Amino acid sequence: MLKSGITLGALVLMAPDLAASAGAQVPAFPASFAAREIATNGATIHVRVGGAGPAVVLLHGYGETGDMWAPMAADLARDHTVIVPDLRGLGLSSKPASGFDKKTQAEDVAGVLDALKVLSADLVTHDIGNMVGFAFAAQHPERVKSFVLIDAPVPGIGPWDEILKNPLLWHFRFGGPDMERLVAGRERIYLDRFWNEFSADPGRFPEASRVHYAALYALPGAMHSGFAQFAAFDQDAIDNRAFLAAKGKLAMPVLAVGGEKSFGPMMATVMRAGASDVTEAVVPESGHWIMEENPSATIAIVRAFLDKKG
C-alpha cells in the first residue's frame, strides 16, 4: 500500500523500500569488470563487462543507471559473462536527440552484443529496461535464451491502458522544454519524489546512491533523455501490439518479478498477456527499487531461475 492508499499490486507500477544505510557507499562493480564505450545505432553506449561463461545482459530503468546492478553482476560473474549497459541518454552513455522508442533502443542492445561477439544471452531487466528488453526479445527472439522482467509494465501489453489511468503516473506525460527548465538544477528534488513515493521505506534508498544518481541525471541532456523515454510510450505500445499481432507471444522462458509492496504478482498477470511461458516471483519486503531494498532476495530469485533454466 502506497502512502496515497493505492495498492500498486492491483494495478500499477512502482514502490520502493531501499536497503542500505545513508552512510553507505554506492556498490561498486568488481575490479575485474572493464568499461567500454560501444558506438552503435546512432549512440555510444557505456557498457561494463565482466565474468566468463554464458552471457547475461542487465538493463536498468529510470532514476538509476547500470550501476544499480553491481551486486547482482558480482554474483552472476562467477559463472556468466555479465554485460551491463547504460541505456541511451542515461548514465555515461551518449545523449542523442532521438531514438528513445524502445524498438530503436533494442537495436542498441543488439549492437552491443554484436560488438562483444555475443550471439545470444539471458536478459534481466528492471523498469524501462523491461520495455527495451521486450522490444529486443520480440525482434530478436533467437538471441534471448530467457527473460527476467522486474517490477514495471510493458507498453501495450496486458492492462496497459488501465495502468495509464493511475494518477501516480503523472510523470509519464511530464516532459518538454518547459519541464526541463523547471527541473534544471533541481534534479535531486525531482528524483527524490520517485525514490520516496515508490518505496515502502524511503530510508532504505541510501543517501550515497541518491547523490550519485542525481549527479548523473544532472549531466547535460540527461533529463531531456529521461523525459524522452516516457514520451515514447505511445509509440512503444503501437510497436508492441504490432509485434504480438505479427509474431505472437514471446516463447522463451520468462520470469515476472514484482516487489511485494509494488507490482507483486501483477507482474506475472501483465506478462502472461505477452509471453507463453511465464513463472511468477515476488521480492519480499521490497517495493520498486529491488536492488536497494532487498538485493539478496532479488539476486537469489534471478540466480535460481537462470540456474534452473540453464
Image (cartoon, rainbow, N blue to C red):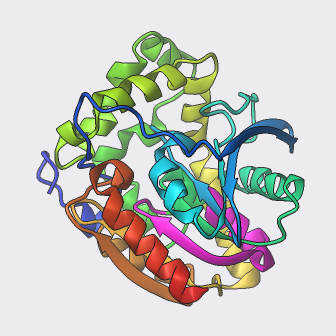
Residue 18 sits above or below residue 37 on the image: below
Q: Is residue 1 magenta?
A: no
- Residue at (37% x, 40% y) in the render: 170
Quarter of image, res 130: bottom right
Where, quadrant-wise, is the C terminus in this rendering? bottom right
> Could you say which is closer to the camera, residue 112 or residue 52?
52
Residue 84 sits above or below residue 263 on the image: above
Q: Position of residue 137 (x, y in %)?
A: 70, 71
Quarter of image, res 94: top right
- Please state if 244 lies on the left or on the right of 169 as rendered: right
Q: Position of residue 199 (x, y in %)?
A: 24, 46
Quarter of image, res 89: top right
Q: Position of residue 95 (x, y in %)?
A: 71, 28
- Residue at (65% x, 30% y) in the render: 92
Where, quadrant-wise, is the N terminus in this rendering? bottom left
Taking the image as drawn, is residue 255 in sight?
yes
- Residue at (27% x, 49% y) in the render: 16
* Magenta segment boundaries in residue numbering: 132-153
